[in-house]
Amino acid sequence: MTPAPHHHEYVIRVGYADTDQMGFVHHSRYLVYFESARTELLRTTGTSYRQWEERGVLLPLTGCSVDFIKAGRYDDVLAIRTRLESCSRLRVSFRYEVVQQESATLLATGATHHVFMTPDGKPTRAPADLLGLLAPFIPPTSSSQ
Amino acid sequence: MTPAPHHHEYVIRVGYADTDQMGFVHHSRYLVYFESARTELLRTTGTSYRQWEERGVLLPLTGCSVDFIKAGRYDDVLAIRTRLESCSRLRVSFRYEVVQQESATLLATGATHHVFMTPDGKPTRAPADLLGLLAPFIPPTSSSQ
Amino acid sequence: MTPAPHHHEYVIRVGYADTDQMGFVHHSRYLVYFESARTELLRTTGTSYRQWEERGVLLPLTGCSVDFIKAGRYDDVLAIRTRLESCSRLRVSFRYEVVQQESATLLATGATHHVFMTPDGKPTRAPADLLGLLAPFIPPTSSSQ
Amino acid sequence: MTPAPHHHEYVIRVGYADTDQMGFVHHSRYLVYFESARTELLRTTGTSYRQWEERGVLLPLTGCSVDFIKAGRYDDVLAIRTRLESCSRLRVSFRYEVVQQESATLLATGATHHVFMTPDGKPTRAPADLLGLLAPFIPPTSSSQ
C-alpha cells in the first residue's frame, strides 16, 4: 500500500525580475510562487485549476500569511512544498514551505486560505468529484496543523 | 484660442518592488508606467478606459518598444509624458517620454501600438464618439513622428 | 493640543497590470500597496526610507498577512490606511486597511513585520533619531492591538 | 560535425498572476519571459548570468521591442526560442520567439539590446573568455537579421 502523497513539491528558479535592490527576492513574489505551486498540486490530481475555472469553480483567496526566515536570491533554485491543510465543500487552505535547494535551507513558510466561488462572485460548494480528487492530499485529522 | 493639449503628463513615484538587484527600475516596469499614463490621458477626455471596456471596446497591444537612456531608481519621481502618435478607427499608437523630475533627465522613451477589439477577441472599429474625445490629442499631420 | 497622527492615508488607483483574469486585483499586489503606503508614512516624518537605506538601515520583512474581505477591481481608487502597530529598537510592525473610496468599502486588512538590518544582512538597532521620528505614529499602549 | 546551437529553447507555463482582466497574459510579462530565457541560454554556455554579475559584468537593457501576434492565456505552456542576434565586446542583442506549444502558434516576437556595464554603472568591454562562451550562439553573418 503506497502512502498518500500528502505534499507536493514544485521547483522554480528565482528570476531577475523577482529581486529588489536589497538583492533579495521581493517578499510579494512568494505569493506568486505559492500560486504556481498549488496550481501544480492541483494538476497532479488529474484535473487542473484551468479546468476548475472552466467548470465555474473559482478559488479566490480570503487570506494569506508568510513568515520570512532567510532571504532568497537571484538564480536560487527553490523547492515549494505544498500541502492541503484543510478542505471542506466551502473552503480550502494550503500550507507552503520554501526551501533553497542547494543549501537545503528553509527560506519561508506560508499559508493561503480560499473559498469556492462562482464566476459571478458568489460563494458556492465545490463539486464532489473535484473534492474527491483532492482527497489524497488531505492530511489525517491527527496530523492537521 | 487655446492650443490643443497634444500631450499629457502623469507623475508616479518608483516603488521598491519596481527595482531589481542592479538597483535600477526593472525594465518591464516601464510598460506598466506607460499603461497608467495612457489610462490617465484617456481619463482627461471625459471618459475612461474602464468605461471603454464596459462598452465593449478593448485596446490590446499589438506592439511596443522602449529605449532606455538612463536608469531610474527607487523613490524617483517620474513624469510620464504621453501623446497620441496616430489614431484611426482601427488602431491607435501612443508615444511616451519618462523624465526623472528632480534632475529633468530623460530616462526612457517608448511607444505602444493598439487595435480596437471586442470582448470576444475580434478586431472592431472604435465608436465615433470615443474617437472624437481623442481628437484634441491627435497631433497635426505635419508634426507626426 | 493636536492629537498625534496615529495613522497615515495613501491613495492609489488600481492599474490594469494589477488585475488578473478573475477581474480582481491580484492578491499579491496588496503587499506592494502596503509597501508604497508605509514608504509614504515614513516620508511624512521628515525623512524617507531611501534616506534610511543610505544611512545603512534596511527594513526587510520577517512576516506579513493579509485578510481579503471584498475584491478590488481595475481603476478603483483605494485608500491605504497605515499605522505603526509596535516599534522597538530592533523591530517594527505596521497595520493596514484598504478601503475602496467611492463606496467606502473595506476590501482588505493586513500587517507587515520588519527588523532593522545592516546592508550586509545583520540585525541592527535603529538609530535613536530615526526612531524618534516615528514616535507620533506609535499608538498609546492602551490602544495597541 | 554537429551544427552550432544557434538558438535556445526555454519552456515556461503561464501563471495566474501573469494574466490581466482581459484574460490574456499581460504584455509586460513577455519581457520577464525573455529575461528568464536569455538567463537559461547563458547557463548552457557553462557559465551563468549570476556569475557574470559576480565578476562585475552586468548586462542592462538599452532597448527592447515586442510584437504581439496572438494572446497568451493562463496555463499555456510557452516555448521561448532565443538566439543571439549580434554580439561585440561592447554590446549584445537577443531575439525571441514565443510559441504556444499545444497549438504550435507563434504568439509574439521580440528583441532586447544590452550593453556591458560595470557594477558602478560605467560601460565596459566584456571579458574575452565570456564572449568566447557565446560564440556558438552567434549566427553566421549571412543569416543575421
Image (cartoon, coloured by chain):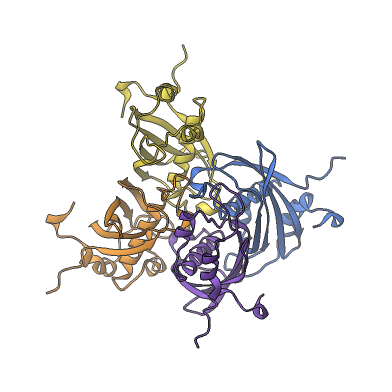
Chain colours: A orange, B blue, C yellow, D purple
The quadrant of the rendering that contains the C terminus of chain B is bottom right
Q: Nearer the viewer, residue A112 or A119?
A: A112
Point 84% across, 54% down: residue:
B143
Q: Percent x, y for residue C110?
A: 37, 40
Quarter assignment of residue A138: bottom left
Q: Percent x, y for residue D102?
A: 47, 78
Relative to A136, is C99 on the left or the right?
A: right
Q: Is residue A107 above or below residue B56?
A: above
Point 35% across, 29% down: residue:
C125
Relative to C101, is A121 on the left or the right?
A: left
Point 53% across, 56% down: residue:
D57
Quarter assignment of residue B31: bottom right
The quadrant of the rendering that contains the N terminus of chain B is top right
Q: Percent x, y for residue B16?
A: 49, 43
Q: Nearer the viewer, residue D131 or D36?
A: D131
Q: Is residue D9 above or below residue A22?
A: below
